[in-house]
Image: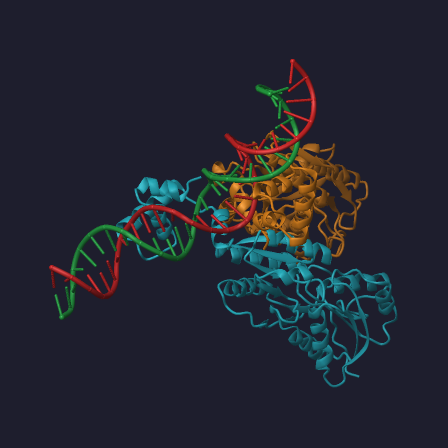
Chain colours: A orange, B cyan, C red, D green
Amino acid sequence: MATVKDIAAAVGVSVATVSNVLNGRPNVGREIRARVLEVAEQLGYRPNRAAQAMRTGRTRAIGLVLPDLTNPFFPELAQAVENTARAAGLLVCLVDSQGRVEAEADGFSLLMQHAVDGILWCPVGPRPPPILRGLQKPVVLIDRPLPGYDVVQSDYAMGGRLLAEYARRMGHGRVGLLSGPRRIESARQRRDGFAGASPRGLKVAWEVHVGFDGALSAEAEAALRRRRGATLIVCGNDLIAISAIRSLARLGLRVPEDVSVSGFDNIRWTDLVAPRLTTIAQPVGAIGAKAVEVIRERMSGAPHVGRRTLFDVALVERDSVRRLARR
Amino acid sequence: MATVKDIAAAVGVSVATVSNVLNGRPNVGREIRARVLEVAEQLGYRPNRAAQAMRTGRTRAIGLVLPDLTNPFFPELAQAVENTARAAGLLVCLVDSQGRVEAEADGFSLLMQHAVDGILWCPVGPRPPPILRGLQKPVVLIDRPLPGYDVVQSDYAMGGRLLAEYARRMGHGRVGLLSGPRRIESARQRRDGFAGASPRGLKVAWEVHVGFDGALSAEAEAALRRRRGATLIVCGNDLIAISAIRSLARLGLRVPEDVSVSGFDNIRWTDLVAPRLTTIAQPVGAIGAKAVEVIRERMSGAPHVGRRTLFDVALVERDSVRRLARR
DNA sequence: GCTGTGTAGTGTAACGTTTCACTTCCGGGA
DNA sequence: TCCCGGAAGTGAAACGTTACACTACACAGC
């Protein structure tokens, strides 16, 4: 591959001048500038990123650390991040921790060795791993806030509120909660948004916490069996909702005729399952794009302010929640 | 961050010796070796990949170029690839081309600038883009073969055969094909496997090609409306099958009571849709892991032999194909 | 005592780029 | 005529690592 040296030799100037041209510095005359650009083009010159990285300490690559690509929320996010980043000339380095903090730490270590310029991170745990302490590169959180970090996410409180109001409007008085993990902040926000909205006459009969991957614990199964008067099961995300529907089906209960179920995320395929899922849609693509934008600002020196960027969400009404007759 | 120089200074040897220890070269005595390792550990030394890359020309990073993370086959694949790669100390750089060859080419350019050691690629087009001509790094194809490249994929011919035999066994005599894109080799393999198996008494009544993303063309909709005696619709993948089921539902047809549908891939959620999809399962995780293994061999000098690694697939019998009464 | 061989360790150039400090040249003002 | 300032361009060091060519030394065999 062609190097600055080759260009310099071809044009008959010094490598310093070539570098100056390539980096748009002003101290080069018109003609030489033009010549250099021309030759670079025609030699198919591409800067050697490793050499640049070595000299400048910047790699023009970012890390994307995700908990589980198997949850359809994340591929969509990753796609948006990658596309936005590539448009800005940034390479995306992927880590999928499969929900394990040790894998996450390994991933960070790898990313740090490669000296990525910044990290987009959706954390699995409630606190940053020690290895991040020694990182002087910007980190921007996606979807799940952690104290002291910038974060880009949906307005989950709004989502919870929307759901609560909708439940009331549809005549539901007692609901059961199949919430996401206790230690994941975004799960808590959804839950608190719902519980906190509490329109008159809406009561949370019970609550069980389960994983976001939709695997139901024995406790959750038991809760679905008993139900204690709940006419609507409000689930922490769509995966949980789909699992709940299946579980209810095994109990001989039909959704929404016998019991209603709501989801959260509006992942693709939620309108393909039966019944089609009523859920909260979030602008995943916009979140990914915004996250890249934020980290780019941070990479170019913007101060870290622990800022939270929120996106509006919307109720998507489909078939899994039934309107109850007014008593 | 600590460098070899720091270690050398701390131990009181030359940087060359430190490097020799770190790279497991033999010409260092026991004691010094131990000292160096100890100090490296305690200084939290991590090799600077950029500097290594510069010196050796190897980055210990690989590219993963995918057509569409939105298709559930690929996240699962990406997860397997990333995990296997990370276990081998390799960083995965992601490109999602959204099915566009220009985006694919951009991605390659980016990966080449960053000098990845190899590329895992699931191509969207029928031929490699020109930019790949100038690449001297190994490329291994995943899922979709291209002439002259190594490829790791499922035995799609076997899948097609399995499906054909099953169809016959279930009493279906005339089938319609909703095949994947004509120009994608893996789609062709599935199709040919099915059509080529042709047990006695099994007839392909019609065939329409559609995209792997499950968006049905007007022609496809029309074919589903007419059906021309087909009792089973054999779909190129699960996304197509799910779309077909929806489309049939809009026509007032129930699956499998009125018409049967089969899928391909066994993506997650296929047992959540209604009816649960009968399909062909492929070992996605194993494919991803194997692909990493193959590219690692290639990276360490194994010759390029245009080798094809095939994985067995299996029929997953669920509810979307009905047994027909023997006439 | 000499040569040969093997082990342990070192000095330093090189990879491709950026950047600081420097030189050279030219024109204008005093 | 001399000096100054700015514009245009250059030399070379530096980033962290590796690897080649080398030295120093000990010891065995004759």
Residue at figure coordinates x 69%, y 73% from the top left: B189
Q: Is residue A206 above or below residue B326?
A: above
Can residue B7 be seen at all in this image of the molecule?
yes
Relative image position of residue B242 (x, y in whole percent)? 75, 62
Percent across and percent down for residue B303 are 52, 70
Give the quadrant of residue A313.
top right
Q: Is residue C20 above or below residue A223?
A: above
**Image spot of residue B308 (x, y percent):** 59, 72
Count of all numbered marks drawn on residues in the image: 0
Query: The N terminus of chain B appears in which quarter of the rendering?
Result: top left
Instruction: Please tell me whether residue B318 is drawn above or below residue A171 in the rendered image.
Output: below
Name the one closer to the observer, B186 or A301: A301
| Quadrant (top left/top right/bottom left/bottom right) for the C terminus of chain B | bottom right
Q: Nearer the viewer, residue A164 or A91?
A: A91
* Left or right, D17 with reference to B209: left
Query: Which residue is most to the bottom?
Result: B200
Asked if residue D23 lies left or right of residue B63, the reply is: left
Q: Is residue A222 visible?
A: no
Residue in the foreground of this view, choosing between A220 and A242:
A242
Q: Position of residue B252 (x, y in %)?
A: 86, 64
Q: Which residue occupies the foreground of this view, A309 or A50?
A: A50
* Residue C24 figure quarter: top right
